[in-house]
């Protein structure tokens, strides 16, 4: 590969890098949704139990969520491209073993390992893009990144339905192998290695172990809370364990020389506001998608493929508007785009709160389109706000923390909306009447609308508007090296004027 690198100029290398990262991101996000429509076929073929089917999805989600921060930090320490490629190889090999699975246990084990590979890849995609693009262009790059992410989430059910119906459920895993080969080839060809040169290659093993255990307990409690009962001994023990573990992790990180998570990031208003917004928008988005998919299949009687296709208007809005939102964030700052986006999301969710048994898809369509517009206005400015708030050498752990907040927020959203359903219709959706189902759905959408509106307030209050036209590069040229340089960089990233 190295002998062809002279064909890539420094000016277009960043775009090749963005393409390679988006290629891999598509594979990661596709696996979040592509499996769902194949579950009935998997159940018949492998004679899987309901619990086994649940863990086919949850095993991937769990390992992915709990290792995101660790994956980001390892990229900073050992090299982001190296960790990305390592993650791609793990993902591809575990996809192959999932396709060959002879039992539910084999499939769940492969899905858990897939989540590990995804957790190494996902933060690297953001940190590599952050390193490749100057701050003045990161919003545009993040917009394309967000658009590809949304596209993958939307086409997942469509691709999964087509492959399951016309080939085999195993094909949804084999599909990852050529995509992984393409991602590896593009990365070796175009992506430049980067790492955090301010630290050595020391790994905070105590922090990794404690954070992994605490997040495992938290995510497991959120995933299983409605099934096991929120007052059950198991869920209470998991939540207490998660709280104790997170407190212990904070103590460890404040004492080690090279912490895995640098808590000083949270003193930056832009970073703190962005990660809180990330949790809120994922809370609203995943809860909505999960239960609207059930509504369209169980009440409107669409097939899984037909239901998946009907989510496309939301996704097409994200794909089209997210890059534009990123460019606007580069020019005007992320603050009011984030606030406006979450207000639009809240309006969309409020429109869904009036859903009825006999609602038609045309009546739902404006809500779907508003949802896509709101998410597009929020996601890329939110991401660029977080990544521009930290020095570029810390991009790996920053992207890992941001992704972790998104995953935890999404799990919490599904758990809370699930609890609302459980309180209204019991533990079995099949036993609920259509009217009970839509009443519960309306209550859940109302809660999500309020949460999204609260996110708009957080975005407007916490994230600073961009007031200074100087770029980070201009500041670095104007100040002396060392502490003043870093202070200037962080001030501009936060949108503060620099003397």
Image (tube, rainbow, N blue to C red):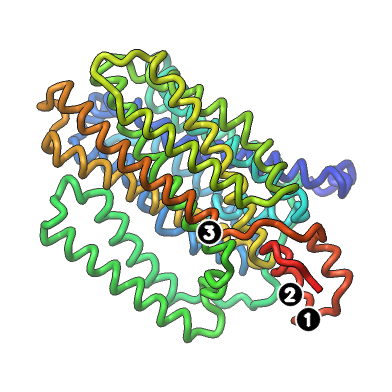
Position of 207 compared to 475: left or right? left
In-front residue for pair 298/488: 488
Judging by the rendered image, the residue that carries numbered circle 2 is 486
Q: Name the disc covering residue 482, or none.
A: 1
* Disc 1 from disc 2: Cα separation: 7 Å
Task: Tell whether label 3 touches label 2 (CB within 8 Å).
Answer: no
- In the image, residue 205 above or below residue 399: below
Q: Secondary structure at mark 3?
A: helix
Residue depth check, mark 3 versus mark 1: number of the one nearer the observer: 3
Q: Residue at x 31, y 43 (%)?
A: 447
Residue shown at 43%/32% (left/top)?
348
Q: Is residue 341 visible?
A: yes
Q: Of 428 and 69, which appears nearest the observer? A: 428
Where, quadrant-wise, is the C terminus in this rendering?
Answer: bottom right
State the image coordinates of residue 479 (x, y, percent, origin top left): 85, 76
| Mark 3, other Cα within 10 Å: few <14 / some 14–19 / many ≥20 | some
491 displayed left or right of 38: right
Tell me, for residue 251, which label it has, or none.
Answer: none
Task: Give the residue at x 57% y 66%.
Answer: 269
**Disc 1 + disc 2, Cβ < 8 Å:** yes
Q: Is residue 116 left or right of residue 493?
A: left
- Mark 3 = which residue? 461
Return the disc, 2 or 3, that comes first in the chain's sequence.
3
Q: CA distance from mark 2 to mark 3?
A: 25 Å
Say left or right for 436 vs 68.
left
Dot 2, crowdedness within 10 Å: few (<14), some or many (≥20)? some
Question: Does label 3 or label 1 sit earlier along the sequence?
Answer: 3
* Displayed quadrant of residue 494: bottom right
Mark 2 lies on a secondary structure that is helix
In terms of image quadrants, where is residue 169? Answer: top left
> Is label 1 in a helix, a strand or a loop?
loop
């Amino acid at each position: 590969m190295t002998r062809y690198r002279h064909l890539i100029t420094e000016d277009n290398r960043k775009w090749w890098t963005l393409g390679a990262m988006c290629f891999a991101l598509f594979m990661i996000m596709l696996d979040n949704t592509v499996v769902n429509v194949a579950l009935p076929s998997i159940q018949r073929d492998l004679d899987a139990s309901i619990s086994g089917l649940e863990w086919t999805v949850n095993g991937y989600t769990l390992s992915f969520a709990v290792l995101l921060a660790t994956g980001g930090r390892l990229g900073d320490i050992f090299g982001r491209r190296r960790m990305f490629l390592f993650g791609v190889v793990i993902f591809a090999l575990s996809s192959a073993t999932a396709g060959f699975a002879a039992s539910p246990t084999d499939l769940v084990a492969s899905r858990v390992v897939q989540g590990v590979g995804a957790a190494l890849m996902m933060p690297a995609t953001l940190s590599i893009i952050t390193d490749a693009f100057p701050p003045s262009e990161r919003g545009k790059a993040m917009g394309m990144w967000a658009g590809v992410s949304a596209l993958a989430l939307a086409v997942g059910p469509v691709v999964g339905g087509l492959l399951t119906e016309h080939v085999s459920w195993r094909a949804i895993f084999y599909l990852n192998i050529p995509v992984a080969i393409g991602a590896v080839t593009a990365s070796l060809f175009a992506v430049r290695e980067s790492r955090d040169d301010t630290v050595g290659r020391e790994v905070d093993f105590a922090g990794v172990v404690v954070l992994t255990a605490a997040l495992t307990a938290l995510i497991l409690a959120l995933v299983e809370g409605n099934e096991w009962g929120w007052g059950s001994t198991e869920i209470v023990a998991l939540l207490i364990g998660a709280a104790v573990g997170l407190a212990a992790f904070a103590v460890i990180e404040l004492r080690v020389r090279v912490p895995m998570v640098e808590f000083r990031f949270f003193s930056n208003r832009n970073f703190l506001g962005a990660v809180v917004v990330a949790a809120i928008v994922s809370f609203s988005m995943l809860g909505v998608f999960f239960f609207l998919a059930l509504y369209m299949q169980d009440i409107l009687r669409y097939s899984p493929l037909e239901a998946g296709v009907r989510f496309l208007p939301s996704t097409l809005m994200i794909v089209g508007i997210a890059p534009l939102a990123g460019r606007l964030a580069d020019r005007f700052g992320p603050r009011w785009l984030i606030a406006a986006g979450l207000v639009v999301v809240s309006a969309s969710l409020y429109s869904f709160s009036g859903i009825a048994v006999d609602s038609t898809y045309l009546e739902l369509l404006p809500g779907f389109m508003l949802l896509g517009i709101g998410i597009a206005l929020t996601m890329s400015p939110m991401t660029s706000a977080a990544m521009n708030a930290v020095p570029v050498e810390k991009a790996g752990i920053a992207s890992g923390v941001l992704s972790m907040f998104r995953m935890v927020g999404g799990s919490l959203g599904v758990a809370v909306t699930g609890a609302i359903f459980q309180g209204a219709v019991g533990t079995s959706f099949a036993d609920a009447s259509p009217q009970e189902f839509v009443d519960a759905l309306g209550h859940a959408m109302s809660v999500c609308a309020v949460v999204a509106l609260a996110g708009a307030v957080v975005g407007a209050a916490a994230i600073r508007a961009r007031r200074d036209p100087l770029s980070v590069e201009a500041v670095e040229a104007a100040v002396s090296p060392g502490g003043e340089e870093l202070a200037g960089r962080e001030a501009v990233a936060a949108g503060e004027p620099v003397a």
